[in-house]
Amino acid sequence: MENINCKLEKMGLRASDLMIPKKGTDLSKWAVVACDQFTSEKDYWEDADRLVGDAPSTLRLIFPECYLEDGDGDKRIADINRTMAQYVKDDLFDTYRDCFFLVKRTCGNASRWGLMASLDLDRYSWEKDSTSIIRATEGTILSRIPPRKKIRKDAPLEIPHIMVLISDKEKSVIEPLAAKTDRLPEVYDVELMKNGGHLQAWLVDSDEDKTAIASAFGKLYDALDPKNPLLFAMGDGNHSFATAKSCWEDIKQTLTEEQRKTHPARFCLVELENIFDPGLVFEPIHRVLFNVPEDVFLAELAKNADKVDTEKVGCRNCIAKHIADQSRQRFGYCTSDKHVVVTLENPSANIAAGTLQKVIDSLISKGYSVDYIHGADVTDKLGSEKGNIGLFLPAIDKGTFFDTIIKDGALPRKTFSMGEANEKRYYMEARAIK
C-alpha cells in the first residue's frame, strides 16, 4: 500500500478519507448545485431553501454568490462554520478511509464519469505561464479569492464543486472502473433537486484498483513533456481551488517540514474527469459589446491579426456552421442589421477567445462595456439591439485543449463552460481539512 501511495503522490494525487451523510439522510436535500451558478436568479436559491427545509444540507454550508452583495456576508460565514461544526459534532457522516469514489452523473440522455480524489496544492499554480503539473485553464481573478478565504480558513470540512480534467485518450484511468460497477460497493444513488439529473457513486478502495489507477496515471505522467508537464487542468471551480491553495500557503508557514508532508489542508478534494468522455460537453461562452460602433470594433480587431476577412451570412445558425470549422481562426458577430463570419490570418492568440479578449480589454479601457453570455439565442437577441455587437465563439476542441494550455498558458476568463448551469457539480462528498 505504501508503494501505491508513493506512486500516486509523485503525480500530485492521493486517495482520501471521504465523508458522506449516514444512511437514512435524504441526499436529495443534502446535495445542491455549485454556489457560482444561477447568480442572477435568487428565486432558484429561495426555492432550494424551501425544498431543504430543516433537513441536513450542503445549502447550509455554502455561500450562494447571488447573495454576495447583500451586506450580510459575515453572518452567513459564521452560520456556515457553526453548522459545519454542528454536523460533525452530531456524527452526521460515515467516513470511507483511504479511497476513491467512482461517480456517474446523468442529465437527460447524457452521462459522464468521474473519480473523486485529492490533489496536492503544492503542485498547483494559477499563474498564466505556469508549467506546474496542476494548473488553471482560465485567467484567475485574484480579487475573487479573499471572500472565499473567509469561508475556508475556519472551516473544519471542505465540500467541493471542483472538476479537474485529465487528457486520457486511451480511456485508461476512469473507464475501466466504470466497466466493473457491478463488482464495486455502491455508496449512494440519488435524484438531484431542481433538474440536476441523477448521481451515483461506488467505492474504490482495493489494492488492485488503486494499483491500476496508479499504473494508468503513471503512463500518462511518463508521456508528458518534463519541461511543461500538464497532467491536471482545471475545468470548473478554479477559484475555489485557488482559495484552497492560498489558505494552504498561510497554514504551512506555521508547520515544520515533516508536518507539511501530511497535513490535510495541503490537499484539495476534486472530481477528475476525462476530457474525452463523450458525456462531457464544452459549451462556448459568447460576448455582447454594448454601445460599440462596428467600425471601432473592427479597427481594434485589425490590430490583432495580419488580415481580417468578413463575410455576411443569413442568420446565427449560418454563423454556427461556418465557425465549427476551425482549420483557420474564425468567429461570428451580429449587429442590428446583419450577421457576419470573421476569418483571421496570423491572429494574436491561439484561439478566437484569446484574440477577442485583447480586443475587449482595449475597448473596456476606452469606456465600453461587455457581458459574457451562456447561449447563442440570448447573444443574438442582445447583439441585435441597436448599437450592440454580439460575438459568437466556437466551441473549444477537446483534442487540442491541453496543447492550447501548454502553448498559450491559461485561457482568457469565460472561454468555455462544462455544460449548462443545472449540469454543474452538486456538493456531495466532504473531507476533513483540520
Image: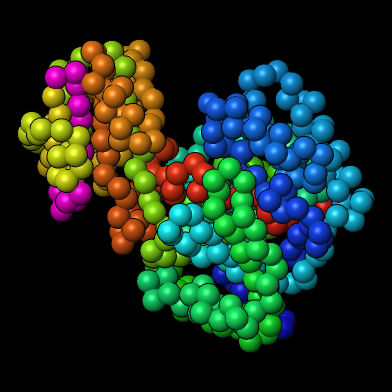
Q: Is residue 146 visible?
A: no
The magenta segment is 324-337
Q: Is residue 364 above or below residue 260?
A: above
Q: Residue at x 28, y 13 (%)?
A: 291
Q: Residue at x 66, y 29 (%)?
A: 46
When asked about the image quadrant of residue 120, the answer is bottom right
Residue 231 % position (x, y) = 47, 64
Tell whether 230 sits left or right of 253. Answer: left
Judged from this view, the residue extending furthest toward the bottom is 208
Q: Looking at the image, which is closer to me, 260 or 389?
A: 389
Residue sitting at the far right:
89
Q: Position of residue 227 (x, y in %)?
A: 42, 64
Depth check, front residue: 398 or 344? 398
User: Could you say where residue 103 lies in the image, as x and y percent from the top left?
Assistant: 59, 65
Magenta span includes 109? no
Colouring convention used in this rendered image of the protein: rainbow
User: Viewed as shown, does residue 391 lie left or right of 2?
Assistant: left
Q: Which quadrant of the structure image shows residue 268? A: bottom right
Q: What residue lies at 37% left-to-right and 41% top-to-bottom?
A: 415
Residue 328 is covered by the magenta coloring: yes
Residue 276 visible in rendering: yes
| Displayed quadrant of residue 354 | top left
Q: Residue 97: x and y, percent?
A: 78, 71
Residue 290 is left or right of residue 219, and the answer is left
The residue lying at 39 percent from left, 54 percent from top is 281
Q: Quadrant of the N terminus?
A: bottom right
- Marks counted in the figure total 0
